């Protein structure tokens, strides 16, 4: 019998195998955003846009861009992180 010990978001299985429960992995997201702060800002801004898009669906305004990836998640932040991982959302260089 294998026991799985939960340590935050990582399952540690006897024998040295560890499996991350976060998808997409934070390391991959940090490579795309550059810094933790940049990732937080980018993901939160995009999540707000996605939330606004879903809120105005019935009004027919169409002023926000819909989600750019097909996701099983219904949460705007999870969708935003998946978009960043898929290179659908990037930061604009500052002047």
Image (cartoon, rainbow, N blue to C red):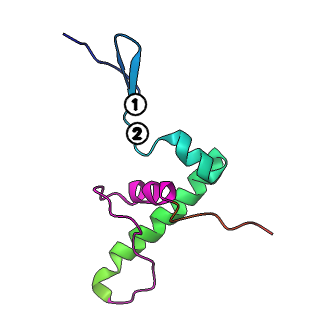
Number of residues whose C-alpha sits closer than 10 Å to that of mark 2, classed few (under 14), some (14–19) or many (20 or more): few
In terms of sequence position, does the residue under pointer 1 or pointer 2 come before the other?
1
Given residues 23 and 55, the one toward you in this image is 23
Disc 2, SS: loop
Main SS type for the magenta part?
Answer: loop
Q: Position of residue 34 (x, y in %)?
A: 66, 49
The vertical placement of 15 against 61, above or below, is above
Report the magenta residues as a range.
60-86
Q: Which residue is mark 1?
A: 9
- Quadrant assignment, res 3: top left
Q: Quadrant of the N terminus?
A: top left
Q: Which residue is drawn at the image coordinates 38% and 64% (left, top)?
A: 69
Disc 1, SS: loop
Q: Which residue is drawn at the image coordinates 40% and 54% (left, top)?
A: 78
Q: Which residue is drawn at the image coordinates 33% and 89% (left, top)?
A: 60
Residue 85 in magenta? yes
Given residues 41 and 72, the one toward you in this image is 72
Say if mark 1 contacts mark 2, CB within 8 Å. yes
Q: What's the distance in space between the residues labelled 1 and 2, CA to CA?
A: 7 Å
Q: Which residue is mark 2?
A: 22
Q: How many marks?
A: 2
Q: Position of residue 67 (x, y in %)?
A: 39, 69
Q: Which residue is drawn at the image coordinates 31% and 81% (left, top)?
A: 57
Q: Position of residue 46 (x, y in %)?
A: 50, 65
Number of residues whose C-alpha sits closer than 10 Å to that of mark 1, classed few (under 14), some (14–19) or many (20 or more): few
């Amino acid at each position: 019998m294998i026991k799985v010990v939960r340590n935050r978001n990582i399952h540690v299985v006897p024998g040295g195998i560890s499996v991350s429960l976060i998808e997409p992995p934070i390391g991959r997201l940090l490579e795309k955003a550059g810094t933790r702060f940049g990732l937080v800002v980018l993901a939160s801004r995009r999540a707000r846009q996605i939330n606004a898009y879903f809120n105005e669906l019935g009004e027919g305004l169409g002023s926000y861009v819909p989600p750019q990836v097909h996701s099983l998640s219904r949460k705007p932040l999870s969708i935003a992180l998946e978009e960043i991982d898929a290179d659908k959302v990037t930061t604009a260089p500052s002047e």
